[in-house]
C-alpha cells in the first residue's frame, strides 16, 4: 500500500547537514548530476567549507578513490585564518570513473594545543590542561589502527603530561615536538568524524585535456591550378606529404574539415557567393551528393584505403587525426530522399535551409531532431562507429548548440561507453548557458570566446573564469583563428598580433589550435565579414610555406618554439594553476603557472611566468609586481629567470622592470630556475 502524505509527515526529520558541516564541495557539476572532469596527469584542486560551532578546531581530508579501488587520503589546508575553506591538490593518474568525498572532523589535538598554550602561559587551569592533554594522548595511544611506533610515542607523551612536577615548558616539549606533528599529520586526533556524500569524477586520457591542434583542408594541400584557371584537387596522398611539417612544428592533433562528398545544388561560389563557377569545389560542410553522405569520402580526395593510409602516416609522425562531425545535409544528400522526415518542410513544400541571420546557408539543410529522434540517433551512432572503426578517435563537432542537448548527452555516452578513448570537441560559439551545457553533458573540449578577448581586462577575466570558475567541466581549446574567424585584432595588428595571440593561447590553456595560414599572417578580410578574403571554405588555396619562411613572412619557427616549451614544462599542461599578477601598464598582462615537484616527472617544481604586451602597435615599459606566494617562494625571495623565447637570463624578485617591443619580442615566457630562491615549505597551493 502506498505511503500517504500523513505517513510521510510522521517520519522523523533527518538534517541534511552532518555533525561537522561540509558545504560547497568542489569540484562538482550540478551537485553530482554529471561527473566533474579530469585527464590523466591533471592536478585537481579539491575542497569544501568545513566548520563547526564554537571555537574548537576542525580539520578536513580528501578521500579520493581510483577506479581500481585504491583510496588516496590527503589532508586539506585551510585557505586563510579568517575563512572556513579547506583545499588541497591531488593528481589523477589513470583513466576511468573516480569518486571522492570530504571528511570533516573535530581536531582534538589542535583544540587542546590552542587552549593549553594560552592558559598555561597565563597560569590559568595549568594542571587541568595537562590532565586533558594526558587523557587525549592516552586515547590516541590506544587506537589500534595507528602504527605501533606512533602508539608508543603517544603513550610517552601521555606519561609526561601526567607528571605533576617539572617546568611546564619541559612537560609540553614532546607533545609540541616534530615527531608528534608528523604522526598527527598522517592521522589526526579526530572525533565527530563526518563524511560528505561521494561525488563522481571522470578521468579521461591526456589528449582529452591537453594538446596542440593544427587544421588544414586536405583538398588544398597539393592542389594545382591548371590552364584556364581551374584547379586539380589535392588528395590524401598529397596531403600526407605535409604531415611531417605539421608534426615538426610540435602539433599533436591534425584536424580535417569534412572529407565527404559535397552537394551541387545551391553550391556556394568563392567568397560565399551564390553563383559558383565551373570547378568551384563548394563548402565541405554542405555534405552529401551522388557519391554518398556522411559515411563516404569525396572522390577527389581518394578512397577509404587512401584515408586509412593517411591515418597511418599521421600516426607514424606522432599525429592523431581529428575528423569533423557535422550533422547537416546538402540538398543532394541521400537522406533528403530516403528520410525527408529528418528535415523541416515549409508550408510551400520546400525544405528549410540553415540560417543564422544575417547569414544564410542555402547549401545546407539542418536536421529536425523531433520528427524521428530514434532514427536520427541510430544513424548518428552508426556514422561515428564507422569512422571509429577506421581509426578516428577525435571528432570536432560542428555547431552542436543547434542540436538538442539531450541528443548529445545520449550520443556521447553511447560512444564513450564502448570507446572511452574517443574525444569530442564542441564548436559552439554561442551563449554561455548552452556552451557550458554541452561541456557538462559530455563534450571533452570546447571552443571558446578567446578570439574576441584582446584587452588586458578581457584576458584576465576570461582566463580566470576558465581556470577557477568552470574548470570542473569546461575544457577550453584556444584556437587562435578559424576559417570563419579573422578578428579585427588580427586584421590590423600585423605580425605582432599573431605572435601575441599565439603566446596567450599556447600558455594560457593546455589545449590550443591553429588554422593553416595563421603562421603566414593571412590577415586580409573579406569586406563586411570577420573572415579571410578568398576563404578556403569555398575554394582551393595553395600555400608555399617554405618560401614564406625563407622570406621572413612566417612565424612557424615561433610556433614550433611555443610547442617545444609546452612539452618541456609540465606546468603548462595544467589549466587550474593559472594565476594573474599585477603590472603598472594596462597593456601588460602577467600570469604564472606553478606546479609543485610532487606532481612533476622529475620531482622538481616547475614555474612559468608569462608577460605579454597585448598592444601590437607599441613598445611598453613598466614594472611587474609578483605575488611570490603563488610561485612557492617566500616574500623576500630573489631568483633567476630564463626567457625561454630569447634565452636572456635575469635576476628577479617581487618588483621587476620589463620592456616589451611588440615589433620584435612582444612577450617573455620566463622559467624560474629551480632552487634559485627561498622556498615555502610544501610550495604554494
Image (cartoon, helix red, strand yellow):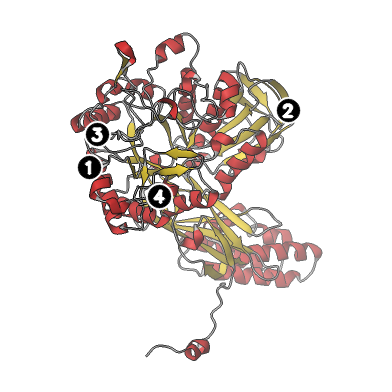
Q: Residue furthest right?
A: 122
Q: Residue 80 location in percent, x, y? A: 68, 53
Picture layout, residue 134 above or below residue 489: below
Q: Is residue 92 visible?
A: no
**Which residue lies under the disc numbered 1?**
389
**Marks 4/1: CA distance?**
23 Å
Q: Is residue 327 left or right of residue 49?
A: left
**Marks 2/1: CA distance?**
55 Å
**Which residue lies under the disc numbered 4?**
203
Q: Residue furthest top?
A: 551
Q: Secondary structure at mark 3?
A: loop
**Which residue lies under the disc numbered 3?**
297
Q: Which mark is residue 623?
A: 2
Q: Secondary structure at mark 1?
A: helix
Earlier-in-chain disc, 4 versus 2: 4
Picture layout, residue 653 above or below residue 558: below
Occupied quadrant, residue 498: top right
Q: Is residue 528 visible?
A: yes
Instruction: From the viewer's side, name the closer residue of 293 and 510.
Output: 293
Q: Is residue 18 left or right of residue 284?
A: right
Judge the density around disc 2: few (<14), some (14-19), many (≥20) Cα neighbours within 10 Å.
some
Q: Secondary structure at mark 4?
A: strand
Q: Nearer the viewer, mark 2 or mark 1?
A: 1
Earlier-in-chain disc, 3 versus 2: 3
Earlier-in-chain disc, 1 versus 3: 3
**Marks 4/3: CA distance?**
33 Å
Earlier-in-chain disc, 2 versus 1: 1
**Marks 4/2: CA distance?**
41 Å
Amino acid at each position: 500500500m502506498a505511503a500517504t502524505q500523513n505517513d510521510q509527515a510522521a517520519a522523523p526529520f533527518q538534517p541534511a547537514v552532518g555533525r561537522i558541516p561540509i558545504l560547497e564541495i568542489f569540484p562538482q557539476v550540478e551537485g553530482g548530476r554529471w561527473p566533474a572532469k579530469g585527464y590523466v596527469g591533471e592536478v585537481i584542486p579539491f575542497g569544501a567549507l568545513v566548520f563547526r560551532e564554537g571555537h574548537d578546531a576542525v580539520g578536513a581530508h580528501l578521500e579520493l578513490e581510483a577506479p581500481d579501488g585504491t583510496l588516496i587520503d590527503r589532508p586539506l589546508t585551510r585557505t586563510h585564518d579568517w575563512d572556513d575553506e579547506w583545499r588541497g591538490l591531488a593528481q589523477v593518474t589513470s583513466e576511468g570513473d573516480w569518486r571522492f568525498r570530504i571528511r570533516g572532523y573535530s581536531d582534538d589535538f589542535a583544540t587542546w594545543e590552542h587552549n593549553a598554550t594560552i592558559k598555561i602561559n597565563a597560569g590559568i587551569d595549568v594542571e587541568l590542561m595537562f590532565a586533558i592533554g594526558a587523557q587525549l594522548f592516552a586515547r590516541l595511544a590506544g587506537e589500534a589502527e595507528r602504527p605501533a611506533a606512533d602508539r608508543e610515542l603517544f603513550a610517552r607523551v601521555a606519561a609526561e603530561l601526567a607528571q605533576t612536577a617539572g617546568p611546564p615548558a619541559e612537560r609540553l616539549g614532546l607533545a609540541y615536538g616534530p615527531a608528534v606533528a608528523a604522526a598527527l599529520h598522517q592521522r589526526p586526533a579526530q572525533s565527530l568524524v563526518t563524511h560528505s556524500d561521494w561525488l563522481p569524477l571522470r578521468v579521461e586520457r591526456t589528449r582529452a585535456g591537453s594538446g596542440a591542434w593544427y587544421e588544414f583542408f586536405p583538398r588544398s594541400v597539393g592542389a594545382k591550378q591548371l590552364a584556364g584557371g581551374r584547379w586539380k584537387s589535392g588528395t590524401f596522398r598529397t596531403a600526407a606529404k605535409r604531415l611531417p611539417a605539421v608534426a615538426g612544428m610540435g602539433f599533436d592533433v591534425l584536424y580535417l574539415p569534412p572529407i565527404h562528398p559535397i552537394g551541387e545544388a545551391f553550391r556556394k561560389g568563392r567568397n560565399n557567393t551564390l553563383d559558383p563557377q565551373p570547378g568551384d569545389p563548394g563548402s565541405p560542410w554542405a555534405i552529401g551528393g551522388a557519391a554518398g553522405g556522411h559515411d563516404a569520402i569525396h572522390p577527389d580526395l581518394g578512397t577509404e584505403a587512401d584515408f586509412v593510409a593517411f591515418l597511418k602516416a599521421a600516426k607514424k609522425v606522432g599525429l592523431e587525426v581529428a575528423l569533423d562531425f557535422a550533422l547537416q545535409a546538402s540538398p543532394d544528400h541521400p537522406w533528403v530522399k530516403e528520410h525527408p522526415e529528418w528535415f523541416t518542410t515549409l508550408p510551400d513544400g520546400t525544405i528549410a535551409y540553415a540560417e543564422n541571420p544575417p547569414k544564410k546557408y542555402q547549401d545546407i539543410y539542418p536536421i529536425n531532431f523531433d520528427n524521428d529522434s530514434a532514427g536520427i540517433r541510430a544513424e548518428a551512432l552508426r556514422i561515428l562507429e564507422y569512422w571509429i572503426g577506421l581509426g578516428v578517435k577525435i571528432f570536432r563537432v560542428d555547431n552542436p548548440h543547434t542540436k538538442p542537448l539531450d541528443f548529445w548527452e545520449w550520443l556521447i555516452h553511447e560512444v564513450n561507453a564502448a570507446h572511452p578513448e574517443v574525444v569530442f570537441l564542441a564548436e559552439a560559439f554561442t551563449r554561455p548557458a548552452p556552451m557550458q551545457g554541452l561541456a557538462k553533458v559530455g563534450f571533452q573540449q570546447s571552443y571558446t570566446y578567446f578570439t574576441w578577448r584582446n584587452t588586458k581586462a578581457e584576458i584576465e577575466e576570461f582566463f580566470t573564469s576558465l581556470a577557477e570558475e568552470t574548470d570542473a567541466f569546461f575544457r577550453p581549446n584556444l584556437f587562435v583563428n578559424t576559417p570563419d574567424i579573422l578578428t579585427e585584432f588580427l586584421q590590423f595588428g600585423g605580425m605582432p598580433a599573431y605572435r601575441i595571440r599565439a603566446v596567450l593561447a599556447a600558455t594560457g590553456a593546455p589545449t590550443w589550435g591553429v588554422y593553416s595560414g595563421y603562421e603566414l599572417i593571412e590577415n586580409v578580410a573579406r569586406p563586411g565579414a570577420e573572415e579571410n578574403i578568398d576563404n578556403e571554405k569555398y575554394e582551393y588555396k595553395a600555400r608555399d610555406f617554405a618560401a614564406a619562411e625563407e622570406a621572413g613572412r612566417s612565424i612557424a619557427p615561433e610556433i614550433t618554439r611555443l610547442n617545444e616549451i609546452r612539452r618541456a614544462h609540465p606546468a603548462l599542461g595544467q589549466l587550474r594553476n593559472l594565476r594573474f599578477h599585477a603590472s603598472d601598464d594596462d597593456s601588460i598582462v602577467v600570469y604564472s603557472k606553478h606546479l609543485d615537484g610532487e606532481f612533476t616527472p622529475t620531482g622538481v617544481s616547475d614555474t612559468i611566468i608569462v608577460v605579454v604586451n597585448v598592444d601590437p602597435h607599441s613598445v611598453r615599459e613598466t614594472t611587474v609586481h609578483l605575488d611570490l606566494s603563488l610561485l612557492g617562494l617566500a616574500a623576500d625571495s630573489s631568483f633567476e629567470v630564463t626567457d625561454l623565447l630569447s634565452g636572456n637570463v635575469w635576476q628577479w624578485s617581487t618588483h621587476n622592470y620589463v620592456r616589451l617591443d611588440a615589433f620584435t619580442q612582444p612577450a617573455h615566457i620566463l622559467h624560474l630556475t629551480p632552487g634559485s630562491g627561498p622556498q615555502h615549505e610544501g610550495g604554494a597551493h
